[in-house]
Amino acid sequence: MEHAIYLVTLIGAGLVIAAAFSSLVAFRFGAPLLLLFLCIGLASGGDGLGIQFNNPQVAYFVGSLALAVILFDSGFRTPLKMLRQAAAPALSLATLGVLLTTGIFGAAAFYLLNLSWLESFLLGASVASTDAAAVFFLLRAGDINLRERVRSTLEVESGSNDPIAIFLTITLVEIIAVHGHPETRVLLTDLAIGFLSNMAIGAVIGILGGMAIVRLVDRLNLDAGLLPIFVITLSLMVFAAAGAIGGSGFLAAYLAGLVAGNSDIRAVATLKRFQSGMSWLAQIIMFLVLGLFATPSQFPEILIPAVLLGLFLIFVARPIAVWFCLTPFRLPRPEVAFISWVGLRGAVSILLAITPLLSGLEHGRLIFNVAFIIVLVSLVVQGWTVGPLARRLALIVPARLGPLDKVELELPGSARHELLAYKVAPGSPVARGQRIPRWARPSLVVREGRSMRFQDMGRLAAGDNVYIFVSDRYPQLLDKLFASRAAVDPEDADFFGAFALDPARPANELESAYGPGLTEEERKMNVSDLVIARLGGHAEYADRVLLGPIELIVRDVDDKGRITGLGLSFEPTASAAQVPVFLSAGEIFDRLKAFYAERKARKTKPGATSRQESATTEDLDENIARNDPTEEAPKDPSDTPLGTAA
């Protein structure tokens, strides 16, 4: 017995270490890390090294606890700014998108597999949600600096759609196991009532639990080493309490993390570091256990239909669901296309596919094997292509900040203050002589091993170590002073234009200087309002607006969404890869409006078409050369009051 304990511990620790080492390969080559975790589990199972594990109850229990830890950490790291920015499209994808994906995929599964309609929809619900761990890792790997709106939408969706898929899967399993094949009316009624109560209870418990976590952390004077364990244990209590009274424990865990992470909780830096490690450990354990539970020798008999279903999910079901959910929002087509592609399936889909086995359904093992293969297809096909597709669709933007060497320390009795240690980077604003605000004067500066007061050393130099004791509300402002200039790819050297433009200048001056063809209403705006209007009411960092012969680029936006910096370019960038589908509601409306306006114009001027067709090519060329502003050489910005060298 004693030797068995040592052997199990040795094997388990070895698998975890192997999974941790595989992250080096993933980060170096951009491989989907979770695919490596799964492959290690498969290689160690009964068809590989011979480790026998065939206990669905244990696999589901371990996976559920691991998922609760991951969701709490995901919510803890989601700032409210990101949630506000992407709440509407992301929540639409997390609710309606999951339902649509389940229905579309279930219809295909019914015809490709020998399953009933309810079993087909059960399989669809199992693979309907995207995997938060896979999405977070792939957006982080390879230095993919996406547009904020796209990144926020994907991260909020992947963190919030699991509870919906879990509820659908468990409900369908219970209906199939108890009622066999109920009438459609009964099924829809059960789903609607159960969904509302499940989500409502989970939301209430999650919000109250998050507030309780913050209050307890602030009130109890726990040891610094015990505090992170206390918080993660409380999050599991919130998860269990919500599930015990009929709510969604996973939604409760995510919301508890969201509430706690966006409050003034004590020791937030320490908690984030600990939870990051726990989240990685949970991912490794969950994928290894699920890989061990699978039996690859059973895959060949259903390999072809499972692969076809995986491709159908990637190329048909997910894109249709995404387009339908995002149609009301004025998102550019490249962004919608990218969101539809980054719908990676992962451990949640495999975990949900275990539920039919727990209930002893006739085709439970078939559903699990198909779901497992679909996850492998998703990670292989989509996991390797996220970076190249983002570049192809021109969704990668230069980083706002360059390298930053910073350490955060929380001191006892600091009253929400932090001790920040910066190393001055070459080319940073402070190294170039920019003054540090009075409220952030350094307490100590270390230069070449000598410590001195800031008042005694004059200008900071590259390589200095600066120690600042400051309120925890201001570190982001200081980061901009101590970060070096962002490294920009040579091909993107002129990304923000060669000239700076004051956002407060009247747009009428643009019309006078460059003739972009503004309407009378647009000429009355300032340049900032013009850009926001052209973008559909919201501007973000790196947005671009084409105005005739010039292009305006948003260089910076403040916390309230106001444009604080604009660039002007005379060489508009080449358009991104054309996406023939994914029209938004705004584009559909604009096209219909233009179509009916053209029809109305033809009816009021019946002879206009024939007169235009009778014009000679020479007349048209002369007319274009005389009236088209794009045919004229662009004016030097120094000749106008608008452009200044960047």
Image: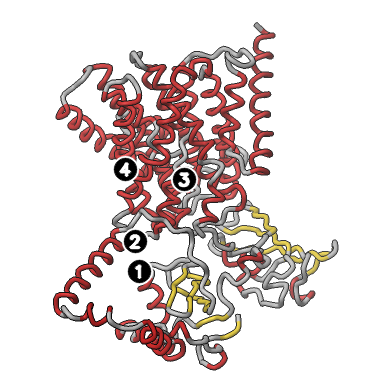
Density class for disc 4 (Cα within 10 Å; few <14, some 14-19, many ≥20) is some
Q: Nearer the viewer, mark 4 or mark 3?
A: 3
Disc assigned to residue 342: 3
Q: In this view of the protein, which residue sits in the foreground, 355 or 476?
A: 355
Return the disc, 4 or 3, that comes first in the chain's sequence: 4
Q: Nearer the viewer, mark 2 or mark 4?
A: 2
Q: Amino acid at mark 3?
A: Val
Provide the secondary structure element on which disc 2 rests.
loop
CA distance for labels 1 and 4: 25 Å
Circles 1 and 2 in contact, beta carbons < 8 Å: yes
Q: In this view of the protein, which residue sits in the foreground, 599 or 502?
A: 599
Q: Amino acid at mark 4?
A: Thr
- Above or below residue 228? Residue 641 is below
The residue that mark 4 highlights is 95
* Residue 42 point in image, percent of width and height: 57, 22
Location of the N terminus by quadrant is top right
CA distance for labels 4 and 3: 17 Å
Disc assigned to residue 330: 2
Location of the C terminus by quadrant is bottom right
Q: Amino acid at mark 2?
A: Arg
Circles 1 and 3 in contact, beta carbons < 8 Å: no
Disc assigned to residue 537: 1
* Residue 35 point in image, percent of width and height: 56, 33
CA distance for labels 1 and 2: 9 Å
Q: In this view of the protein, which residue sits in the foreground, 367 or 152?
A: 367
* Residue 381 point in image, percent of width and height: 51, 38
Return the disc, 1 or 2, that comes first in the chain's sequence: 2
Q: Nearer the viewer, mark 1 or mark 2?
A: 2
CA distance for labels 1 and 3: 26 Å
Tell me if 80 is positioned left or right of 180 in this view.
right
The residue depicted at 55 percent of the width and 80 percent of the height is 500
